[in-house]
Amino acid sequence: MSSNNTSSSSLDCQRQGSRSLDTAISCLYFLTFPAALVLNAGAAWVSLHLRSTSTFVVYLKNLVVADLLMTLTLPAIAAGRLPGTPVWFRAALCRYLDVIFFCSLYTSITLMGVISLDRFFKIVRPRGRLLGQSLAFSRASSASVWVVIFGGTAVPTFILTDLRPGNATGDFCMSLKGPHGVRFHQGVVLFSEALFWFVGAVVVICYICITHKVLQSFRNSGSNNSRGQRKTKLRVFLVLLVFFTCFMPLHIMRVPFTQEQTEEVCSFWLEAGNTVALWLSSTNVCLDPLLYIYLCKEFNDKLVAVMASNASSDVPPKCDSNHQTSLVVPVFHMVMFPVALVLNCTAAWVSLHLRSTSTFMFYLKNLVVSDLVITFTLPIKAMYSIQRGSIVFQIFYCRYLSPVFYSSMYISIALLGLVSLDRFFKIIQPCGTMLSQNMLLGKLMAALVWVNMIGAMVIPTIVLTNRSHPNMTMQSGCMLLKGPAGVHFHRAITIFVNIFFWLVSVQVLVCYICITKRVIGSFRSSGSRNSQGKQKTKLRVFLVVVVFFVSFGPYHVVRIPYTFQQTKSIGTCPETWTMFTKEFSLLISTANICLDPLLYFFLCREYREKLTAMVKGLSSSLRVTSKELIEWLVNIRSGNPPGVPQEVPAGVPK
């Protein structure tokens, strides 16, 4: 929990693998940060509206603060792992931010243990008022956790990390500590290790006792509520799964890694395991807010009340669906948005610097544009799903934004099909320049995709969604705004795009199977025993096909039956499970916008090389800028601001 760290810098073993690992983990931290910030800022916003009427709410609010504090350290930790980070920045991370990160981590772990004890005394020992229901006791307990962890570990670490950074051959952060600092660091690691396993045991015992008590109460009452029993078991399972999946790998690696740190021994695999485990523990800040929604009734009720307070009067009683179910999809959309925005803006940035020298590259650029359009519609789609906004906003979404969203999705599907055809003709028929290398044909095909999808889907939908309805809600759907012609067109276009998707799917599958056979056949005919190359080819094809079918397959299985039910029951509400199945499968399809940029990096050499070169260039520019800034600050402190000539001593020629 002290400034050890793994989080800002690795052992200074000059290995290519270590540098690659640092860069990869840095990217993961950067991707974790926006999702964690949205979720924890939302949790903090809801917490401010919750009255501390129970001990559980007091502990929950403290847990939100700890997670938010840890979230705010993630960008600095990610930057500290990048190659070429200035020494002063790494030193600041070791002395301060790493310490805050670890203290917040163990504050969260301890508060989770306290929450499990609170649930235990409230359910298993309901008469224990002092421990289970006293607000004064809960506030004192929370304050004690913060004082012990931050006062007992953070402050001494700040003081004992007092050496100047030098050319250390071992761990960079350990080189900032004197002998007392190293011994204190070892003691803190052992203390935090013992704390985690003790809290882990408390959590397991408490939740097992709670589960046993709740199930026994069902039996004693003669209830056959199997659904309630399964729900109880699922909640306990989720809490334990999140707790141990996030934190246990780190605490398996922590002691041996600390021993290596203090002895200045370099083991790449031990460092790699600890680094990955540390990032995994940081993902808990994304999972905790989701657990609040699913497991805490007070938090969930307040979230619903705050977000949908102005829409409750518009929802007909027969459309009143389960609030937990209706919040799942928009919450995931809001979490997905910052991640998709970062990935697709990066992809667009790289694409602008790539020359369109091949049809493949041209199709890729068009795919980036369609994914970026989908990305920008996500916040509005989430707001519509939670019924947030006026009737005018909902009509605007149904008439304009929804057609743009769906047409962009099918443009992406069509472009993925064109990419597979392009690869097929380039590898299977390398002499077919007309189909595989003709840039004019490639531009014409891409233009036809955009024109057909926009002309066949967007414009007719805008024209035929021409009604107004005062009681329009998300549950009743956009069908209320369509006349008879609009309903018939909606049904027809749904059947058309479904058939289109399955035709493209067959084409993608056939093309990549043929490509795989051709490449492996070329290995055999050349007498090559390059098994690694064969496996790499199979893996690439497998990734493309799996991402395509996992993303889009489920939605197109449920879409047609949902549409027929939707168009036959206009003015009434679809069944909750049908609505949820359709929305959740659409969410999976939307997640493709986060997967496509990763596929560009792993499967497209030109894209990967350009991105690597641009990141290196940006890193060099940042290093130069930071160096100039430091020199400017040093000059200011020494009384010689830039542009002011220094006095020349007497006798020295000017």
Image (cartoon, rainbow, N blue to C red):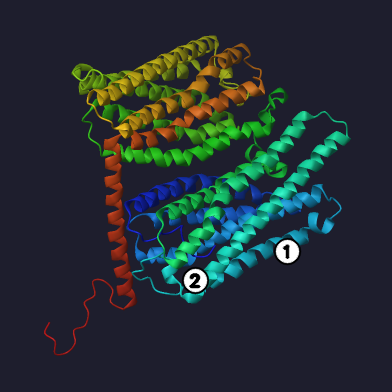
Given the image, on which type of amino acid does mark 1 rest? Answer: Ala
Q: Position of residue 379 (x, y in %)?
A: 50, 36
- The amino acid beneath tag 2 is Val
Picture layout, residue 485 above or below residue 654: above
Residue drawn at 75 percent across, 53 percent down: 118
What is the C-alpha distance between the residues marked 1 and 2?
32 Å
Q: Residue at the location (79% across, 57% down)?
A: 131
Relative side of 292 to 173, left or right: right
**Local crowd at mark 2 within 10 Å, few (<14), some, or many (≥20)?**
many
Instruction: Residue under label 1, please give it.
Output: 140
Count of marks, rendered view: 2
* Residue of label 2: 182
Taking depth in this image into account, of 95 and 532 the one nearest to the observer is 532
Vertical placement of residue 284 versus 457, above or below: below
Q: Secondary structure at mark 2?
A: helix
Determine the secondary structure under disc 1: helix
The one of 403 and 161 positioned closer to us in this rendering: 161
The structure residue drawn at horizontal position 46% and vertical position 19%, both measured from the top left corner, is: 462
Q: Is residue 158 visible?
A: no
Sequence-earlier tag: 1 or 2: 1
Q: Residue furthest left?
A: 653
Q: Position of residue 197 (x, y in %)?
A: 64, 56
At which x and y percent is residue 492?
49, 10
Image quarter of the N terminus: bottom right
Residue 631 position (above or below residue 605): below
Residue 467: image x %, image y %?
Answer: 55, 18
Residue 68 image label = none
